[in-house]
Image: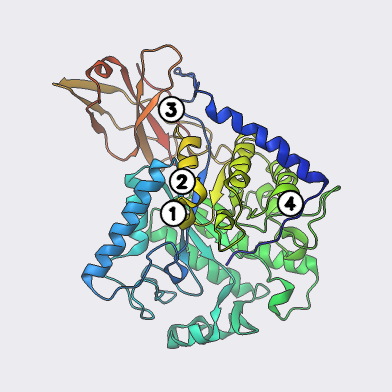
Amino acid sequence: MKKTITSFIGFWGLCGLLAAQTLSFLNAPDTVCYSREVTLLPREVRAVWLTTIGGLDWPGRPAQNAAGWQRQRNDLCNQLDQLKAAGINTVIVQTRIRGTVIYPSALEPFDDCFTGQPDRQPDYDPLALCVEECHKRGLECHAWVVCFPVGKFAQQKRYGKRAINVRRPDLVKRAAAEWIMDPAKPATATYLADLCREIVEHYAVDGIQLDYIRYPEHEVGFPCRLSLAEKQANVTRCVRAVHDAVKSVRPWVKLSCSPVGKYADLPRQSSRGWNARDAVAQDAVKWLGEGLMDWLAPMMYFQGQNFYPFACDWQERSNGHPIVPGLGIYFLSEKERDWPLSVISAEMGFLRRQGMGHAFFRTRFLLDDTKGLLRFTAAHNRQPALWPAMTWADSIAPPAPRSQIRREGYTLHVSWQAVADDRPGTPVRYNVYRLPRQEGAAPVLLAQNLDHTQFSYTPALPSLLYDTIVVTALDAYGNESTYNP
């Protein structure tokens, strides 16, 4: 599971008081201007981690028959519907768990969370289902890949000859009661790259997120006598191999990682020995600077002085890339830290004011409306948001589609001609908006990420039939076209 650190109160905790003031903007009306030259919607990453290990968020309990597998499919769709309603736009689904995966792979066995039986697949492909159902709802689907930890001895033994410690004993080391892949072995980088290449070759995922792409903390007992610089070089080699593999197949796929929540010590605030760069050889800022990462989701499961100054530090080092702090919403639970909702709501407000997104760990604590979080999030995200464009990779938007509108009773049928991106082979999808006639009213997103060229709209009120309907084109890098009136 992801690393947590107990927060404490100190001078920098005053930053938290300032953050609370940012909540006032939530009660103000959305005032988004629009024209042919201005972005119709804000850009912000709003993500959740969908945990599959042990079925925690999904699929819940395992099943052995068609009825049970249909229940799993229905549960995923219900969760995605709720996430969409709450303004979430990104689902990071745990795809590689611990040397096991949730799709039919030539490299690794199928995890037992869906059927209760090692290497047995249900009657559907879970990753394909996630991608399909996310895209139906205009959500991005990122594959979450746990890199170096590959499971406890007893768990891996259940997978027999397909277990990684049996197939590739040269890549793993013993650490207490578990196996961990050795970053010092060049073949480890190749193996992880092959795994990520397999995913992007067979699935239209929008991103790959690397988790535990770092050396284990000292307490794990991983045998290693290398210097910090040598460790950093080993981890970076793995990141570079994955980057090259992913981008060679689909260059628009967003590569990210979830680093330890504090990058390094600050001049006036210590990380108390637990940070990404110096404690676990995870130099994520360097990866951004070298173009090996497109965005970061640091695991900032803290509050007060352990959160605000370190969030600002990440943003200052972002090099123009999205920083999406992970928020430890599981700490809202009475069984965990029993945080009040104000801890998370203040952090969300602060991050928005700083131009940063947010990611929730884990999905279940959001959908259970823990401490009222689901209701707060829906209000906080009442206007949809598009992903920030990957302008460092491509900044040219597709041409504006030419659309036609035909009215049939109280329904408007919108159609348009497909457009091509300036980069051959780059996917283009379409957004449909209603532009209200009222001055200053925000545009309304009617449909998002459509892969076809027609859309029908029946408004709730007949008067809305006379608003302007426009279509924009959105390339896979996130660049949105203007629109034709």
Element type where label 3 sits in the image: loop
Residue indicated by mark 1? 368
Q: Is 259 on the left-hand or right-hand side of 192?
A: right
Camera-side mark, 4 or 3: 4
Which label number is shown at residue 374?
Answer: 2
Which residue position is annotated with label 4? 306
Task: Please report whichever mark, 2 or 4, sits nearer to the chain's N-terminal start.
Answer: 4
Towards the viewer: 375 or 297: 375
Q: Where is residue 321 in the image (x, y as percent from the top left)?
A: 62, 42
Q: Is residue 344 left or right of residue 63?
A: right
In space, the residues marked 1 and 2 are separated at their CA atoms by: 7 Å
Label 4 Cα crowd, 10 Å radius (few <14 / some 14-19 / many 20+): many
Spatial CA distance of label 2 from label 4 is 24 Å
Q: Is residue 264 above or below residue 319?
A: below
Question: In the image shown, does 215 or 115 lie closer to the viewer?
Answer: 115
Is the residue under label 4 in contact with that under label 2 (CB below 8 Å)? no
Q: Which of marks 3 and 2 is in front?
A: 2
- The local secondary structure at tag 4 comes to helix
Q: Do the residues labelled 1 and 2 touch (CB within 8 Å)?
A: yes
Residue 178: x and y in percent read: 59, 82
Q: In which quarter of the image is the N terminus?
A: bottom right
Helix, strand or loop at label 1? It is loop
431 and 7: which is toward the camera: 7
Mark 4 or mark 3, which has the lower sequence index? 4
Residue underneath mark 3: 481
Mark 2 or 4: in front is 2
Residue type at mark 3: give it: Ser
